[in-house]
Image (cartoon, rainbow, N blue to C red):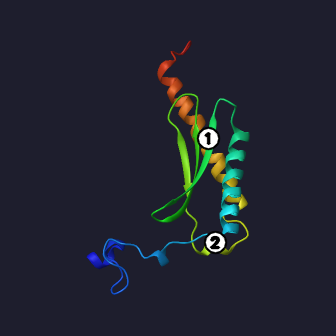
Amino acid sequence: MNGNTPYAGNPGITQAGKRASADLPELTTDQKRMLRQDVSRIAARTREFLPNEYVVDSEISHGSAGPQATVAVRPPVGHPVSAGFTPDRDDLDGEDLIAAEDRDEVARGLAASAALQVKQAMQEGVTPTAR
């Protein structure tokens, strides 16, 4: 069973519990710039859907699976929501690392999730005035 997990390593290539650096996608300077631009577009689009009380931020980091992008929304009340993206090797050769329709879908989803957090937080503390 150990051979079926990514933790077993490739025989003769990668030690058990280690990842080969060749397995991780490495971004060029242009690809990093494109990823930053795509993530900024998601954050900007999310801001368009929400009032100013919501804080929207983005981050690009290098995790154990390679480059990772995150867009997060902190609503005025309720729990923060976030969406993450890790580009595949196949995505690295394209014009956009995140397609335009995917950017819009993520932005709409984040905005809806943040609004739902506010609604759920407010329902707990508000007594209905009528039935």
Give the quadrant of residue 29.
Answer: bottom right
With respect to residue 77, does 93 lie above or below? below
Crowding around mark 2 (Cα neighbors within 10 Å: few <14, some 14 to 19, many 20+) is some
Q: Residues within 10 Å of mark 1 (few under 14, many from 20)?
A: some
Horizontal and vertical percent for residue 63?
A: 48, 60
Measuring from the top left, give residue 42's x and y in whole percent. Answer: 68, 51
Point 57% across, 70% down: residue: 88
Q: Residue 61's spot in the image, x, y percent?
A: 54, 56
**Numbered circles on residues, count:** 2
Q: CA distance from mark 2 to mark 1?
A: 29 Å
Which residue bears the numbered disc 2? Answer: 92
Q: Secondary structure under badge 1?
A: helix
- Quarter of the figure with the N terminus: bottom left
Residue lying at 69% horizontally and 51% vertically, measured from the top left: 40
Mark 2 falls on what kind of element?
helix
Q: In the image, 80: left or right of 17?
A: right
For the residue marked with disc 2, what is the amino acid? Leu
Residue at the extreme top: 129
Q: Which mark is drawn over residue 112?
A: 1
Residue 98 visible at all: no
Mark 2 or mark 1, earlier in chain:
2
Locate the C terminus and report the quarter of the image it occupies: top right
